[in-house]
Amino acid sequence: MKFVASICRIAPLVAVLFLAAPGLHAQTSSAPPDDAGALAVKFSAIYNAIEQNYAEPVDADHAIFDGGVRGMLSALDPFCAFLDRDQFELLKEQARGESVGFGSILYVSVGKILILQTAQGSPSFRAGLAPGDEIVSINGQRIDRLEFQELIELLKASRSRPVRLGVIHPGRVVPEDFNLRPAAVALPTVDKSFLWSPGIAYVHIASFEEKTPEEVAEAIDHLDVPHLTGLLLDLRDNHGGIVDSAAAVASLFLKPNVMVLTTRGRAQPEKDYHATAMPRRYDMPMVVLVNGETASASEVLAAALQEHDRAVIAGQPTYGKGVIQSVVELPESTGLALTAGQYFTPSGRSIQRPLPGTSLTFESLSPSMASKPAAPGSSNGDDPPQPGANTFHTDDGRPVAGGGGITPDVEIPGQKDDPWLAFVTQRGYVTSYAESYLTAHGKLVEPFEVPPEALDDFKQTLESNGVRVPDEYWSIDQNILRLRIKVELVNLVDGLDRGEEVATRADPQTRKAADLFPRVTQILKGH
């Protein structure tokens, strides 16, 4: 099984969940109302009965927090969560855009850890660790003797304390010891940027944090703004982040004072976000690439650019997560992530898709807007959009769909692995083969392409490891396998940034999105 992680991001499930929590507002709990106090008495009586009569001793923390509290939150909606001490600290680190760790991005499989990248200035970087290095021991424990889950637990336990790593550099057989101390490591939110073609810049935003607007501007400026004729902004797999940051990124591309979004909630005053005057603003034509994992704050940005006819949205319909989450701080450094309100686009669309059986029904996502002036481009003038009215309009009158998520102006299907290819990739066979290929052939000679004989050798390697290679899959998967072997080789030789650029340039969805630039004006006019 392939598992890509970072020692400074070693709780991947927590990271995925809480990077999708936009607009994090720390609050403190207050005294409960009278009816809540009465219910608390009932809850206490039930717990006392369990504690006195259950067959085994009751772990109070487990019963109350894992059972009572998490059960109560699950009855509300999927986005509410109880945060234990470690999760709460991780959330605060991510909001700051940093984490405590060593700054290494790792490839992890059973019995093997390879370094794919080290962050500039991080403890790993300063120690001289580099792509292709293999970690063979952690604090004296040999990696090849651990089960996969034991390995993950060891990495999690090691991320925040001094550690001794045994490392073998490429081309050597004797490990060298490195003593590392964890430190605050900046986590970039713009993780890919390069010149796609002459005049066309490509920028991928992984999440939205306080520093994201500055990182976006720096990435664009670095790619020679005076000569840029287009920007391909990739929001795929961006699960969200801080909504103020998404609004600030929108301000880089929109005219000052136009509406970006509105937030509403029972316990929060309604708030309008407008584009602000930024030190830099960019006017080049834009294509924004989205998919089913584009969520929350990234949907806010995509909707604002779409409804003000500033960018063509391309790709697949987005996730549909349009709720504000407030973090309520509890005793003992724990917290609650609670749904506190909703996002609405400039035309009045709710980004949140209805979730039957939860508090997020269609009716709850269509609150009255009668007290609000109509936003530019709203679907029916002075009247608010009504439940069932799923069509809204951009500033120039183009129809855009409501009902949750953002529907692209131009739909481009994504590439999905067949079951056999997914198995081979996830089990790490491609990366392992790339490592053995590099050992046998030395450095890559540019321009490098994986030769046909290497693919035959890879097939034999799979079969020798007991992996069936069905003809019906092998015949259609050879090109993508050749590309993935090349990407893994580049990862090991030149680092993850260069490998991801190679993969992005070969991605059919990205290529089709880039081909839209000659038609941007035409599409935005509704033709």
Image (cartoon, rainbow, N blue to C red):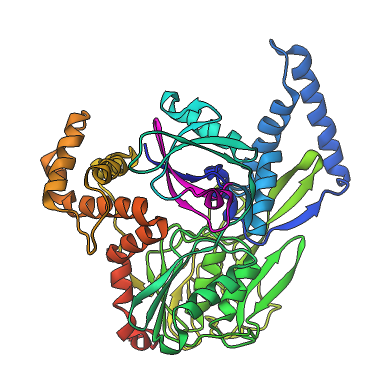
Residue 367 seen in the current view: no
Q: Which quadrant: the N terminus?
A: top left
Quarter of the rendering containing residue 472: top left
Where residue 467 sits: x, y (%)?
21, 32
Where residue 11 sits: x, y (%)?
56, 42
Is the residue 349 above or below the residue 254 in the image? Answer: above
- Seen at 41% across and 88% down, the residue is 227
Is the residue 253 above or below the residue 63 in the image? Answer: below
Q: Is residue 30 left or right of residue 68?
A: right
- Seen at 41% across and 62% down, the residue is 291
Which range is magenta?
Answer: 102-129
Is the residue 130 above or below the residue 161 in the image? Answer: below
Residue 341 within the magenta-colored segment of the rendering: no
Is the residue 222 above or below the residue 106 in the image? Answer: below
- Seen at 75% across and 24% down, the residue is 60
Quarter of the rendering containing residue 515: bottom left
- Seen at 40% across and 30% down, the residue is 111
Instruction: Identify which residue, 307 or 386, lies in the foreground.
Output: 307
Q: Is residue 88 left or right of residue 486?
A: right
Residue 195 seen in the current view: yes
Where residue 436 sits: x, y (%)?
26, 40
Instruction: Identify which residue, 247 or 351, lies in the foreground.
Output: 247
Q: Which quadrant: the C terminus?
A: bottom left
Q: Is residue 481 left or right of residue 356?
A: left
Where residue 250 sits: x, y (%)?
56, 77
Number of marks in the image?
Answer: 0
Instruction: Identify which residue, 187 or 421, lies in the foreground.
Output: 187
Name, please, the residue furthest toward the top.
Answer: 55
